[in-house]
Amino acid sequence: MFISDYQTDLKAATVLDYYVAALWWGKEQNFNVEQLSSFFTVVHTLLENIKEKTLTLLDNMKEFKRMLAGIGVPPPPALPPPQQEIESVQTVAETQSVVEVTPQLPQVPVTVLDCFSVPQAKVMSDYIHNSVFKHYKLYEYMFSHTQAEELIGADLEVEVPKAADMPWPPPLEEGLSGDIYHTYIDIPPPESSSLQIAVPGGESDTSYGDHVPVAMDPSVEVIGDILSKLSAVQIQTIMNSVFEDMLGDVKEDIANKLREKENSFIARINKVHQVQSPDKA
């Protein structure tokens, strides 16, 4: 059949679907090879009459009726062998040639569908009527009009790795090498201040192992000596006096605020009494 471009051409796809459906229907009817071939010839001829010969519906139905002629008619009897001209013996009257003429038998139409029975022909007629003749206008329109071509494009983006002579993937830290990053970008760690503890004799004490030595402040030594000479009661007294000095202003401020609140409440109460006194009078 040479049907090509059936994936993009609607006309070719319709023709292919028409043939496939017909062959599948023939297999469902349990047609043998000869019947299936004859049935395919019928559907192909009817479709070609629409496509190539542009026959009308009535003419195509007549063509189909002509193909069905002869189904169910018994085949003609076998013809006897041809009689040759026989020369008879010269009789007394005269020599005479006798030719025997065979009588002519009635002509029976020869069809490619003689392999079908009458019930099969009826079923086939129903199928042709439902699949072809009912949709005749659609087939005529399909074969007389050209399908509009649509161009569909698709862009494919493919990422490929870089050449083997370059590092892949690029190094971290903004794609810079380690030497450049640590030299110009990386923040160096803060340097720890080395403090030493002064000991008598002018030498630094190095008996602290891995700990960083810390230099002692002279004022810290003086405060430590003073506190070591005081008793617990004296320290408590000093702390109380310090708290009194620190909290004295706070107490005075709180007392003033309480006094103001008290005066305002008393004033409000007096106003209430003054309002109630005239009413009683």
Image (tube, grey):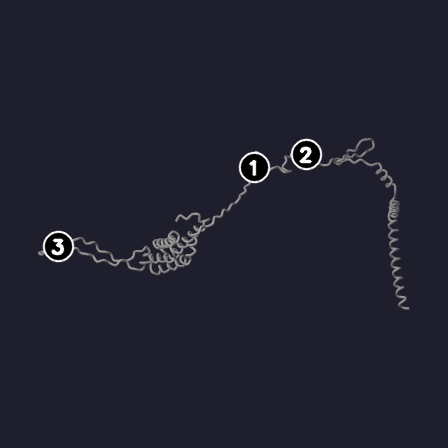
- 189 vs 225, left or right, is left
Measure the C-alpha gap from mark 2 to mark 1: 27 Å
Assess whether mark 1 and mark 3 are in contact (beta carbons under 8 angstroms): no
Secondary structure, mark 2, is helix
Judged from this view, the residue extending furthest toward the top is 202
Residue assigned mark 1: 162
Q: Position of residue 124 (x, y in %)?
A: 37, 58
Residue 198 or 109: which is nearer the viewer? Answer: 109
Mark 3: amino acid: Gln
Label 1: how many Cα within 10 Å (few below 14, some 14–19, many 20+) = few
Residue drawn at (68%, 34%) of the image: 184
N-term-proximal mark, 3 vs 1: 3
Q: Tell whether label 1 touches label 2 (CB within 8 Å).
A: no
Label 3 vs label 1, nearer the camera: 3
- Please give the residue where the numbered disc 2 appears in the rendered image: 184
Count neighbours of disc 3 (C-alpha within 10 A) and say few if under 14, some if 14 to 19, many if 20 or more: few
Residue at the (88%, 62%) spot, across then down? 271
Residue found at the very far bottom of the displayed protein: 281
Judged from the image, the secondary structure of the residue bearing numbered disc 1 is loop
Marks 2 and 3, how far apart in space? 137 Å
Amino acid beneath label 1: Lys
Return the residue at label 3. 96
| Residue 141 at x, y percent in the picture | 43, 54
- The percent coordinates of residue 31 (x first, y second) are 36, 56
**Mark 2 or mark 1: whose residue is earlier in sequence:** 1
